[in-house]
Amino acid sequence: MLLIFIIGYILIALEHQIKLNKTASALVMGVACWFMYTLGNNDHHLFKETLNGHLGDIAGIVFFLMGAMTIVELMDAHKAFDIISNAIKTTQSRKILWIVTGISFFLSAALDNLTTTIVMISLAFKLIHDAKDRLYFASMIVIAANAGGAWSPIGDVTTTMLWIGGQISSIALIKNVFLPSLLSVIIPVLAFGRQLQKQKRTQNDIHESPNPKEISVSQKSMLYVGLAALLFVPLFKTLTGLPPYMGMLLSLGGIWIFSEILNSEKDTADRESLSINHAIRKIDTPSILFFLGILLAVAALQSAGTLTNLANYLTEKIGNQEAVVIVLGLLSSVIDNVPLVAATQGMYPLTQFPMDSSFWHFIAYCTGTGGSILIIGSAAGVAAMGISKIEFFWYLRKISFWALWGYLIGALFFLI
């Protein structure tokens, strides 16, 4: 099982080099791990109960992600995010950098880091046309989006996994991780701000920004209702005690009804392009299947006791629990943080580290912000590579040093 997992991991990490989609590798790895587990388990009834138990937890994460992605796609279909670019009035690149980074940091907490990166890069490129500056902007958006997702239970897949798994609660996570995450962004912004040209945007630079009069009521309504629907989910869990995916499904149903009423007077073609059906077709299904494959594989290793042995080995060799978490954060710059966090959940039970232990908050911070050290370390970074044409070695030379400093200073602040 461990050999299959390692091979699958290597195939996922080398996705672009070998031109094999990581989702396919993850799905084969997940099922193969469970197949190997059956070979060493003669009690098929117990095996079936174990698999079904894990599948219930995994399904909760998958339904949650599907609901969140659909709401964001519906907001995008209504061009709700144009309101944000319209609100940016300054003509200096440095000021725009601070504004865009700040918006990315907070927006990621409400949406997620991948969606925020895609949306904010598109908006930033409407405001900045200098090719060199665009690379810095895209890089800072990745850092800010990853950091913003680390302090919110719905801002990153990994924090959502910890939240659903019972390792963290919303208020405690925000209270303990917000300031370290903010520090990890401020350090790179201060460094990059000096490198941007003090230039004024010309008319050509701003002509794509929507005029305030062109912002419709439906755009404003969908932005506010969509954000409210996403932010309602943690409140729903707190008030009812029901799993987070139930709150997300309720929000999805509510915004579905709202969109139908909002667009009821439009003709059939316009209604279709603004419908939930259209939004569902646009969600990133391969990413959802990737998470499914990863979580299946990790669940198999957890059931076999492999992760517990690994936890004991790391603790024995490194000796310091905080150092172990920092190493995991550094690893997340090379390896996707989803399987890292999933493995950590299996390695360290709640009996050892109960809900809202500083250990889990530190895991959320390190694996969330550590992925920014390399451009391939997060889904947001990989998306930015495709959209902005950022080269791996350019990011390594220009960005990684300051992203690492931000990560380490934020970690030190958290520990202090």
Image (cartoon, rainbow, N blue to C red):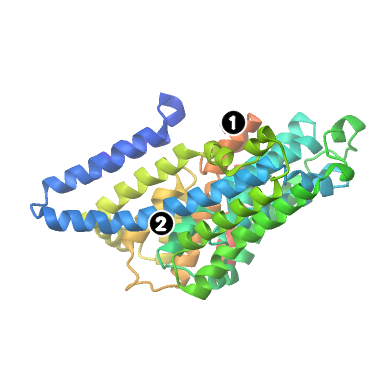
Taking depth in this image into account, of 237 and 164 the one nearest to the observer is 237
Camera-side residue of 90 and 192: 90
Question: Which disc number belongs to residue 13?
Answer: none
Q: Which amino acid does label 1 sit on?
A: Gly
Q: In which quarter of the image is the C terminus?
A: bottom right
Q: Which of marks 2 and 1 is nearer the N terminus?
A: 2
Image quadrant containing the N terminus: top left
Residue pointed to by mark 1: 386
Q: Is residue 18 in view from this perspective?
A: yes
Residue type at mark 2 is Gly
Comparing labels 2 and 1, the label whose residue is closer to the camera:
2
Q: Is mark 1 on a helix, strand or loop?
A: helix
Residue matched to label 2: 60
Mark 2 is surrounded, within 10 Å at the Cα level, by few (under 14), some (14 to 19) or many (20 or more) other residues, namely some
**Residue 213 located left or right of residue 9:** right
Residue at figure coordinates x 73%, y 35% from the top left: 134
Q: Where is residue 314 in the image (x, y as percent from the top left)?
A: 32, 58
Q: Where is residue 388 in the image (x, y as percent from the top left)?
A: 65, 32
Do we see residue 1 in this rendering? no
